[in-house]
Every structure is written in structure tokens, then in C-alpha cells.
Image (cartoon, rainbow, N blue to C red):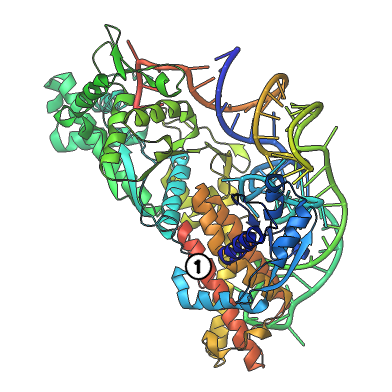
Amino acid sequence: MKNQLASIIAEAVLTCVQKGLLPEVQLPPIEIEVPANPEHGDYACNAAMVLASLAKQNPRKIAQAIADNLSDPEKLLEKVDIAGPGFLNFRIRDEFWRKILQDIHEQKEAYGRVNLGQGKKVQVEFVSANPTGPLHIGHARGAVVGDVLSNLLEATGYRVSREYYINDAGNQMNNLGKSVLYRYRELQGEAIDFPDNCYQGDYIKDIAADILRREGKRYLAENEDETVAAFNAVAGSVILEGIKEDLRDFGVVFDCYFSEKELYQEDGVNRLLDALKDQGFIYSDGETLWFRTTAYGDEKDRVVIRKNGDPTYFAADIAYHQNKFFRGFDLLIDIWGADHHGYMPRLWAAIQALGHERNDLKIILVQLVNLLRAGEPVAMSTRSGEFVTLREVLDEVGRDAARYNFLMRRSDSHLDFDLEVAKKQTNENPVFYVQYAHARICSILRTAQERGLALPAFDRIDASLLGEPEEKALIKMMARYPEMIEGAARALEVHRITFYLNDLAGIFHSYYNKNKVVTDDAALSGARLVLVEGVRIVLANALGILGVGAPEKM
RNA sequence: GCGCCUGUAGCUCAGCUGGAUAGAGCAACGGACUUCUAAUCCGUGGGCCGAGAGUUCGAAUCCCUCCAGGCGCACCA
């Protein structure tokens, strides 16, 4: 709808130029928006105001010229007004709005899919938590945002790969192995002064006990470094399996788990650094190796090889992102906790040094979650073992409510997650508001069925019977669904979908309370059934992108 | 000290990349179940968009300066 209008306007501007009403100007990007005030029509366009400064003419005069030269062979427009400083306000004929209903019924699950991405390959990397402990509530938000963004991009014509980067090399993993070893010794009566930098959670004890059960106490006699490495590997894989299971139950499934260790195979990291050295991006100060990230705007250069010869996390990350590009992705999206924001400039510098554009890597920051229980903050720390796990949240509040709650704010805004509120089945919990709308429609359809009223095909109804204000509002809202999806994908903002759902469900509930769908009037009932089935399809499609259920009964 | 994010109704937050009279939910108050599900609806009140200057036809939105909060500023990840 919006696109049709845009081309009509662009054509009219062209006509004006040809007639000499406007000077030869490049048409700047114009905006077509839905006005806040319905009296301003269905769509409003700022073309005249944008052109005013370029053409050096009065915007209202330009608007008049455009309006006079609109060519509308399909008779899309009911009315065009010029208002305010030079807005063009368009009212679309009802007949065209009703055609949206036809589109929905023809396209069903596909309604709202657009081809923004044109088959481009995108990789979304998210969660990527160290396998040193179970996922907690903080990881959950990033998991949902990444998963839903992936769904959204798939729905808008991208080919998406979801990837989890396993940080299984480095100090943190070493601490994990040590933690297990200490518990292992402890289980055999040894008094251990458990270090602060080790992981204290009970899951460590379980892993130690398991090793003891399977392999006995043979490790006591072995070399400590080798034992730590072995424990490390065992613990890492046990914990990773647990993470995968939690994510699966949360509705998050990855296409690929990429191990940091892989990057070091065949000396990959060093070979990359050598190549970058040849290009002048790497230099040595005699003890350490530095990456010249300042060449691309970072505030200081960064170490890639430490004094002790070990590569930094950053060194591996450069290799990792190069590897991603090698795999043929046109666009990379990384989803990080907001506490990593200081890391962005150096990674952008790195990919530019590798010959890519800064825009080839988008980074979405997800703010930390403030976990509350009945208004009281819940303290969290992975190392001390005091945290609320994703598993506990799933068990307590359920998948749908948990996911929806994480999607109700912009990613870069702080989020209060209150366990007591999230599990309440009341109107304080917005997920039910939307699901209830879906369930209600299903209930209407069931009732109709029972009374022998089947859902008619679109061409069997008289759509002009849908004249109530809420009916028109519902249709217009549904017409905006593809536009909302496209906008959300363009901006990489998944929260727009929850706000849209809330609005659509709201209009429906209001309609439901005022009007009956199933009545003695067969023609009217048929038209209304087609309408509410359309609403149901749109609700289900949007909920599908969110990975939240669309129940038929509640 | 430097950098990034945030500041909008009592509370939690939207505001479609500069548009018209700034919105929603919760909370408060008053109404609606003989009905296709009251997990719903209808109505009422509530604002110096942190402050100040600037850019232009037009600013919650963009620039600058402050103020407040959060997060970063490693040869950790």
C-alpha cells in the first residue's frame, strides 16, 4: 500500500518537473507515514516540504502542484488534501483497504513476508557464553533478541545462520578445570581452601563427583596441568550440553556452534597476524605484538600477542570474524551484552583492516537485566554461584511469558524482569493480552462451526458490510503489518513487533466487546468471520516470529 | 579524567530515523458479564519530553554545554 503510494507521488513530482512547475531537482528521500491523527488521512507525505528548500518555492504551492498532477489509474485514492505547512494527506478508498483482507487470506502464513534481504546471507552470532556454568537470566535476553532477530530477517528475505561462539580457550576455561579438580580432591577428604577466582556453583561438585564415580581417584597421582586440561574438557562439554538443552527448551536452536579452539588449528591465528603484519597493521614493541586499531578510529592500539607469548581474546576474535567472512556471509550481526561496548571500535577496526566495510558488521548491544522478585532485587554472580538460571525462569514463568517479557523493550534499554509479575496470569502480564485475542478468535470460529457457519472464502462475502469503525481500524492495522515488519528488520529492532501486537490485539478486544461476529445475519456473519480470521492470521504470524505460542484456547 | 548508553505521566516504557494537538500499560477513581471466553471493554484525571543555548518552515528526535544514573576505559573474556 505504502509502496504503491510512493510511486504515485514520485511520478507526480516527475510530471511537475516536466511541466516546468518544479525545477530539475533530484527527488530526495521522502517519507510516507501514518499520521497520529486520523483526520489527517490514512497516509501523509512530506514531499512538498522536503522539496521546498531545494526548489526555493512555497511548500504549499508545491504540494498543490503535486496534488494536481497525481496520476491514479487504479483509483486508489479517495481524497487528497493539503494541510498544515504543506503535508499531502491521502485517504485510500475503502475498497483498497478491503483488498488487504483478500491478500491475507490468500497468503496466510506468508502474509507480512517481504523481500528486503533479496537472499543475502546473514550470520547472527549470539549468546556465546563461556561454557563455565549454566545460562542465567542475563544470557536469556540476548538469546531471545538474537533468535527473534533471526526469525525476523528470515521473514524479510535473508538467509540466516544462527551461531554460538564457544569461548573454550583461555583463562576462564582453565579456572573451570581447576575448580573441578579442587572439588574432586575435596570429595576424597582433602581440605581445600577454595580460591575466589574459581567457580563455586553446585554444578561443579556434580561434575567432580561424576568423574570420581566413572574414573576413580587415579587423577590424584597425575600431573596437575594435564589433569586440569582433562577436567576442563569434560566440564566444558557437560556444561555446553546443558546449555544447549536449556536453549532448546527456551525455543532457541543454533545452526552452528563454533569453537574458539578451531581457530588455533593449523596455526591459523599466527598466520593471520603475519599477513596483517605484512600490510602494516601489526607491529612489535620488542615484547608484545600490537594491532594498529587507531588507524580506524580506535582510541589506542591493542595487544594481540602478550609478553608471555599467548594471543589475546582479541587476536582470536579477529581470526573468527575473518573466518565468518570467508564463509560467504554478506552481513554479520553480533549481539553483545552492553558491558562489552568498549570493545566495538577495535573489532570494527579489525574488519576494516581485513578489507571489509564497517557496516558489514552490525553490533547490537543488549542491556543487562535487572532481576526482581516482587519488587526486590535478586543478586547475581556466576563465580559465586548465586544466580537465577534460565532453567529456573523457564520452570517458574514459562517459555512464552519469559520470551515476551524480554521483547517488550528496546534492546539498549535497561529491563526490569520481575519473576512474580512474569508468572502472574493477569492483565499485568502483556503476553496474555495478545494470546487471549488469538484464543478468542479461535473460540468465535468454533462457535460459528457449531452453528453450521463455515468460514467463507473471501470472494463469497460482501466486504462492504464491514463498515464499523473498529472494522476499518482492524483492516488498516493489518495493512500496516508488512510495513512494520520491514521497518523492524531495517532497524534491527525486534521490540516493534510486540508493540504492534499489543495495538492490534487492543483494537480487536475493543471490537469484540462492541460487536458480535456470529449473528442471525448470515451475510454479515460471513464477512465478520473473514475479518477476524484475518486478524488471527496476522496475530499468529507475528507471534510466530517472536517464537511465542498462539493458543486456540486459554 | 575520557568514551558509550539512558533521562518522556506517580511507576515501567513507546514515540516509526526531523513532522501536525507527545502516546500505551500499570497504579488511582467511576462504570459494563442473561452475550462468540470479564486474562476483556468503556470513561476520568494525570506532562517545563533532565536543564540551557543553537540549527530551520518545524525539535522529544539533530549540534554544543551542563546536570543525574548505568556501563566501560587490561598483555580478562
- Expressed as whole percent of the image width and height from the top left, the position of residue A3 reads 56, 63
- Expressed as whole percent of the image width and height from the top left, the position of residue B52 reads 81, 27
Look at 45% across and 49% down and name the residue there: A144
The residue to which callout 1 is attached is: A540
Closer to us: A403 or A348? A348
> Image check: A476 left or right of A221?
right
Closer to us: A250 or A321? A321
Q: Amino acid at mark 1?
A: Ala
- Expressed as whole percent of the image width and height from the top left, the position of residue B48 reads 82, 37
- Circle 1 packing at 10 Å, graded few (<14), some (14-19), many (20+), is many
* Image quadrant containing the N terminus of chain A: bottom right
Closer to us: A432 or A78? A78
Look at 32% across and 47% down and name the residue there: A244
* Image quadrant containing the C terminus of chain A: bottom right
Q: Which subunit holds the residue at mark 1?
A: A
> Image check: A351 left or right of A472?
left
In the current view of this chain or complex, which residue is farthest to the top? A286
Residue A192 picture quarter: top left
Query: Can residue A182 be seen here?
Result: yes
Q: How many marks?
A: 1
Up the image or down, B55 lies above or below B47; here it is: above
Up the image or down, A53 lies above or below A16; here it is: above
Secondary structure found at label 1: helix
Query: Can residue A424 be seen here?
Result: no
Residue A384 picture quarter: top left
Closer to us: A508 or A11? A11
Up the image or down, A292 lies above or below A405; here it is: above
- Expressed as whole percent of the image width and height from the top left, the position of residue A278 reads 24, 20
Residue A478 picture quarter: bottom right
